[in-house]
Each structure stands twice: as structure tokens, then as C-alpha cells.
Amino acid sequence: MRKAMLAAGAAVAAAALLAGCSSTSGSGSDATADTNLSATISYAFWDSNQKPAMDALIKDFNKTYPKIKVTEQITPYQNFFTKLQTQGSSKTLPDVFWMNGPNFQLYASNDMLEPIGSGIDPSNYPASLNELYSYDGKQYGAPKDFDTIGVYYNKAIFDKAGVAYPTANWTWDEFHQKAKAISDKLKGDGIYGVASGLSGGQEVYYNTILQAGGSIISKDGKKSGYSDPKSIKGLQFVRDLIADGSSPTPSQLSDTPQDQWFINGKSAMFWSGTWVNAELLGSPVKDSIALAPLPKDERSATVIHGLANVVAKSSKNKPAAVAFQTYLAGKKAAEIQAQMGAANPAYNDTQQAFVKSAPWDLNIFLTEAKDSSFPYPISKNTAAWNKLESDLLPDAFDGKRPVAEVAKELAEKMNAALAKE
Amino acid sequence: MSSAVEVRPKGTRAWLGTGATHIVLIVASVFMVFPFIWQILMSLSTNAQVTSVPPTVWPGELHWENFAHVFDQLPFLNQFWVSVAVTVIRTVGQLLLCSMAGYAFARMDFPFKRTIFGLVLAILMVPPQVYLLPQYQIVQGLGWLNTIAGIAAPGIFSAFGTFLMRQFFLGLPDELSEAARLDGANHFQIFWKVMLPLAKPGLSALAIITVLASWNDLLWPLIVATDSTQMPLSAGIATLTSQRSIPDYPLLLAASLLAMAPVLILFLIMQKRVIDGIAFSGMK
Amino acid sequence: MMSTSTITGKAGAVATTAAPATTGRGGRRRPSRGSSRAKKTEWLWAAVFVLPLLFGVVVFYIWPIIRNAYFSFTTWGVFGGATWSGLNNYETLLADPMFWRSILNTLIYVGFLLLGIPLAVVFASLINRPGLRFASVYRTAFFLPYVAMPAAVSMVWRIIFNGDFGMLNYVLSLVGIKGPNWLSTEWIALIAVGIVGMWISVGFNLIVLSAGMKGIPPEMYEASSLDGASRLRQFFSITVPLLSPSIFFVSVMTVITGFQLFDLLYALMGTQNPAINNTQSMVYLFFQHQQTGDNGYAAAVGMAILVLVGVFTILQFRMQKRWVNYV
């Protein structure tokens, strides 16, 4: 993995001396120590809410590298990867850009990404994230932030229904009981015990599958885990919540997203990540909100996902791009992100500012990341089987077809898709 | 002869007819317009009010600052000028090219006329995403990425515009061009001096529709433009949406109302001047 | 626009001194020019008129279609690497129940849009009544949906159609009906999308039809009033036939754009909607396969759309003879 190092051996030594870098485990090009480097690079991302933070990061970066001009390219999420594909097909990729789990392997396997700069030390980030952004033994993504899933709950509704709050080690049964009790009691007011998003598995069903001891995809990314009886158990758990009225139906959740139910006091709980933090802080129910870890079944489990900053292999300004990526992966950048409430940074032990940003116990997310997190399931063509999930699972959750039957069909089709990769 | 001649029907029966007409039109208009009224109300509310369930229709306090906020979030003026530039280029281009081609298809004879027209029409029958990558690569080759030229270029060539103008020219009588031809005019003179003035209704319809299509065009400008100052308004507003959390509805809706205003004003002006008072001159 | 000589009582037939309409495309075949030299001049002029447009069309549009046709015979991943696979994609396509369902959905949607055309004709004739007060106000009202940004408009409609908290279901509940989840229930979602599509397209149709109406001389209405014809009779014997070229145009464009249904579907329903799989239009199917990296198959869907729309359009052009009057 150190071939690039050998070629640039002298430069590495010089860089290490000058920049005082210690461990260099990235196998990509050197983070240039030349602070006089002059270049213009583009940085593409999608969340305009995070723009102020990105602006701040660029400003801070320019303190060390005053002559590198960074232009931002913001594209809305729903068009981001279409545009990226177009750019990828014509070698006009932005120099540095955000990457997420589902799309990562597509770009990595097609040789579009540069391995992470040598100034980036993976031991600074959760292992699951490093794993997520590695392909074929090399790491390509510098983790930027991460999310695990927890249960936000509304204390006022719990009080109104006379139900005890969640505890730190609560189980599926306890969760289900509480949800059902609240739904039964407050049905007349149109309040549900739990209303969680079923579009995509990150919030709910990936987690329940893992908690039941099952899996979504095998470690080598070649086989589907859906036909595993434990995975089916995880799916059944979700169906049961809907079946007895603890949760609204998939159609209802499609019309009205989970956070809307919650911030309007129409649901007592919902499973979600740090990305809703800002919204919750600005909501009418903010004074009643608390956070609990996910309930456990056979084990505690949550998927962990986060964005990464990647450098395009076709970049014409690689030294500058790598310098920027290295900066973004550093401690200062992480602290700025945390302070500005932009995201929960991936760099170990920088999350305190973010944790302090809300009155509820955000530390739960961090503990989960350390103790019970599993990498978000991906493969080279994640989109193909994600589509199968959204095609087939609603019928199972709705009760139109038995869960086991749907799961087996999903596994079959998913295996066929994986075989094509 | 002027189409503005009043033929007011007389008598009670006629009066009832007019009354009924108004009632029908009012009901229909309300149906057309009420989502906008709501959009205006939502743009003057807070996000909490918009996302409250059940929705709060009347915000109580009117939050005009949402509109001011738009200018903080977007380089509104830059994007406005980009929208204008792209739209003007496209519209003028189409008016010229499509009226010429439509005229030829309608009133001239040449080999393979039908096939060529069919070919032109066929480009409307494929999903637009088919064009995305090839057009991107052509524009890239021309060095027009992230420029107004690049955004405007493909939209100048319109099958819809050609079809529309063809239909209009087909509806014009032969006598006029025959007369001009006997006077010794060539094709271009006939086109420019005789036919084109007659096709004003068609041209204004084409202009309005092209202006709108260009103004609201989203996907192509998003792909071609990388700097937010080089994007038209439609694309700029789209960047205000976020991936997961509930978007800032009032901001988005206010921005879209602001973006809609210029075109609406244009329509109001054009309507009065062009559509309303057109004197459809025939024989002199 | 036409001589005021005679107006017969027969629906649509007006005597003019022009040559009668002959060809199936509604184009008039002009009396032969005679010399081949004159013909060649005409061809040259035609070239001048048509080539600028044609050049752009070929470069920007025809070429991509040809490329697409080629790719429909390949297995094509996201970043190149297209391998020839012959008729594979097409065989899979014809056997794919989602493909046929998407055709059905698209046809239903087009049906909704076509229903909007007679409505637009009626509204256009009402608005364009000479001397109608507030005509421009009405016209603006009808046009508004078309002016708005589709994304914003869809947001409002999503809120209206919301199953639990939406305006529509609220109104229905006042009369005791429990409304469904409009945008996330199979079949019903298609109706909701159709309604919004119709709502948007009426404005467009109105503009074109109004422009067409301006070409109908008021004398015709005057004369027939004097003959004692009622408003209704006038509508059917004067307005509709003389407006037929515009109506034809509007219906051809409606079918073509209806088949391209995608943006509205995406904005109103989104990709994670439980009903989207069953409500997808043909272009949505195309989009889905692009998203999952199956670009060859998507290309085949694109070609299928082209063929289908092409057939419908040709049929419409053929049927022109029977009802469209070019005077």
C-alpha cells in the first residue's frame, strides 16, 4: 500500500519534518507542505444548510493556504449524483466533494477516486466509517461526520398517557409495549406511539434486522442477508408495530414524514439520527424532548453512516485538492463543524461542542458509535437493491403479504443483482 | 375588420347567459388560483406553522421578512440576470428559427419534407434524460460549461416551436402569398413582409410558452452550471432544498413567488398589448 | 382572414377561393410550379429556412437519440463499458410486468390531460367572448398554474392531498367521507397526479386556443346570430371547426408531453413512496433503471417510448383529414 510513498520518499520525509506529521497511514499523495501553493479548486456538496459551516472551513483553510481558492458547487441532493455521474463520464468531476455510503463503491470501483492523503490518520475515526469508505484494501474517503440512530421521545406525551420513560437497556418488548400503550390511550387525539421513517432502512429496519442478529448483506458484499430467519424477525418487528396501531402505515408515513408527526406532538417516539437536531431545536415540542438508545433484542445494534470527503482522481489540481481534503479531515475542521452545529463530526473526541448543542443526551449517539455500530450496508451498485427494498417491503409492512415471503423474494432478487456486479 | 367589435347580446336571456358565463369562469378560476393564495399565505408564515398538522392556513402575523431572507440565501440578482439572459437568447432564437422552419414546412415544397418534419417532431418523444449526457459533452467540447451560452444553446432548437408555427402558417390563406408572388416577391420577402405579421398570435403564444419553459427549466441548468452565480433562478431555488430534514417551506415558497413575479408581469403586459388588441388584418 | 362572401349553414364548410385541402398531413398541395428550375429555387429557399433549425436539432437531439438507440442493444453500466447484448433488453422489457404497468399508468395520465382539452376549449370560448368584462383577469387566473415553478406548486398540492392532515380530506370529512392517502395509495395516486397535471395544462392550452380564436372573424358570429343561431349552435358550427387546427395542435402536444410524465410524479410522490412502483410512468421507469445503473435497459425503455408516442402521433396526423379544417 505504500507504493506511492516509495516514489515520493524524499518529499514525504520533508513533508513530515516540515508539517510535523507523525503517522502517515493514508496511501494517497502527500498533503503538500507548500503553503504557498496557488490553485483554484472546486468543492461540491449538497446541503445548503451546511453552507455557513463550509464557508467557515474554507476561510480557516485559507489561513494556512492563502493562495488556494476554493469555489463551492452546491447541487440539491436529488440531483447531486446525477450531476456527478455526468461529470464523471466526462472527466469534469469537482476536485473535492462529499460522498455517501451507497454511492461510494460505484466511484471507487470505477477508479474515479484518489486514495486519502497521507496526512490523514484513519485511527482518528470510528472503525466502521473507515471500513465503509475503503475499497480493495485502500481507503478513499476521509470521514466527515457520522450518524447513529437513537429514539427521540416526547416526555409530555408519555406523561399524558401514563407510560414510563424508556430506560438505557430497554428491550424490543418494552419498546413495543410503550408504543402500543400510548397509541391505544391517545388514539382519539390522533397520536401514535411511534412514527418512524420506512423509506430506506437507515432509521428503522436495518437496525431491527441487526438487533435480531440478522444482516442485510454479507461482509464480502456478495450475498443478501434477507433470507436469514433472524433478519425476517427484524422485519416482522416493524410489521407488528404497524399491525396493532402503534405506528402509522407506510402510506401515512409517506404523506407526512416522521419528523413532522413528532414536532407536532402527534407521535411519542421516532427513531432518527443527529440530522434532525437543528429541526428539533426549533420545534414547538423542544422542551419535552429526550433521547434514548435503540431498544435491543438479541443485541444492541445501530447502523453507522456518515459522509466523507473524497478527491477526484481526474483532478487537475491534486496537491491543492489533497491539501484541502487533509484539512477537512483534521481536528480543527471537526471542531468548527461541531461548533456551528452543522453535523456531528467524525474525528474522535471532537463532538463535545455538538453534544452540548441540545438539552437532550446526544452522548448516546457517541456511545452507540463505539459500542454497537455496524457499517451501513453497501455494495458496488447499492441503488439496485435499495430499489428492490423500496419496491417489495411496503407490502410486507402493510400486511398485504407475509413478511417471510417478501423477505425471501427480496433476498432472491438481491442476490441476482449482486451477482451482476 | 377588428375582432374587438362588440356583439353584446341583448335581452334577459342574453343577460342570464353572460351571468352564467361569469359564474362558470369564476368557479374555474378559483380552482386554478387557490393553491397560489395558499402559497402566498405559507410564504408569510413561519416554518412551524407550515409544517403544523393540521396545517395552519392563516399565519396570524405576516412574516414579510421571509422575502427579504431570500436575498440572503441566494445571489438572487445574479441568478435573475442569468435567467433573463438565457430566456432572451432562447426565445429570440426560437422565434426566428422556428418561424422560418415552420413556414417552410407549411408553405414550401421540398423533398423529404414530411420525413424531416417527423424527425424534428420525434425529438419530443424521447425522455429528456436521454439528452443529458450527450448535450453535456457537446457543451463541454465547446467550452461552454458553466456559461449562459451553454445553458441556453440546446433550447434554441425547438420541435414544439416549429410545430406550433407550422400549424399557424397552415391556417393562413394562399391568396396573400399568391398576390405577393405575382408582385415579384421572393420567398423571404413574402415570409418577412406578409406572412410573419399575420402569424403574430402564433408568435406571441410561442414567445410566452418559451419564456416560461426557459424560466422554469431546472435539470439542464443544474447540470451545466457549477457556480451559484451562473445558475438561473430555478436552479438556485432548488439548492435550498435539503436531503432529509423538512425544508424551510416559507423560504422556498417565497423564493419561488419572487421568481415567478417577473414572468407573471410579463404575461400581464403582453396579454394586454398583444392578445387583447390584435387586429387580425386580412385583405387590404 | 377569409372572404366574407358566403357562409353556408353546413358545419364548418366555408366557401373560399383557395385550393381544397388534400394531403393527409393537412398540408395543401399547391398547384405545381411547373419548371424544374423554379422547383430547385424553391428547394434552395427551403434549405435556407430550415437548415439553421435542422442543424441544431441534429447535433443536439437526433445524435443523442441515435446514441440511445445504439445503447439499447447493449448492457451499459454507469461509467461506460457498454457490451453488446443484442435484443436482450427488449426481450426483458416485453416480459416485464412493470413495463406494461407503466404504459397503462402513462395512458391513464394522458387520458386525464386529454379530458382537459374540451374544458380548455369551452373556457377559451367563454373568455374570448367579445366584450366580456374581466376577460384578462380570467385569462391570468387560468394561466397562473402554468407560470409557477413546478417544485413549489407540487409542495402546495402535497399538502392539500395529505391523507391525514390535508385540505381535501378535511373538506371531505365535513360531509362524512374519510378520504384516502391520495398520493400514496395505488391507483388513487394516479388520479391525484392526473388532476394536478390537468390543472397545470389548462393554462397552456388556453393560450394556444385563445391565439387561434383571435383568428376567427366576429362577422361569422354576427352573421349567424342574424340567421338566428343560438350560442350553443354557434359554438359547435363555428368555433370548434374553425379552431380545429389549434385543437389538433393542442391534442398532439398533449399526447406527446403526457407520455413524458416524470417531473410531476417525482415532485408529488417521490422515490420512496409505497405507491410509486405501481404508479410509475414510462419515463419514471427509464429514470429508475438509470439510477440503478441499468443504462442499456433504460435506453430500451426510451426507445419504446419513442415508438409508442410516434405511433400515436402518426395516427393523430392521419386522422386529421376527418375533422381538422384548414381554411
Image (spheres, coloured by chain):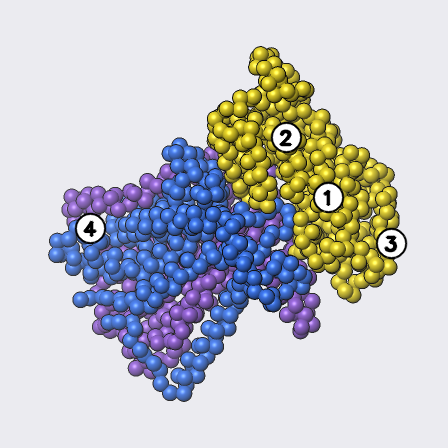
Name the element at disc 3.
Answer: loop
Q: Earlier in the sequence, mark 2 or mark 1?
A: 2
Q: Which residue is mark 4?
A: B187
Q: Position of residue A231 (x, y in %)?
A: 79, 39
Pointer 4 chain: B
Residue topped by disc 1: A356
Q: CA distance from mark 1 to mark 3?
A: 26 Å
Seen in the picture, residue C12 relative to A61 is either above or below; the reply is: below
* Residue that sits furthest to the left in the current view: B183
Give the quarter of the image for residue C125.
bottom left
Q: Quadrant of the N terminus of chain A?
A: top right
Please give the residue where the numbered disc 2 appears in the rendered image. A329
Chain given the colour purple: C
Instruction: Identify the residue at image location x=71%, y=37%.
Output: A351
Q: Quick one: which chain is blue?
A: B
Chain letter behind tag 3: A
Q: Are marks 4 and 2 on the same chain?
A: no
Q: Are marks 1 and 4 on the same chain?
A: no
User: What label sits on residue A164 in the rendered view?
Assistant: 3
Disc 4 to disc 3, C-alpha distance? 87 Å
- Tags 4 and 2 touching, CB below 8 Å: no
**Circles 2 and 1 on the same subunit:** yes
Please name the amino acid that badge 4 sits on: His
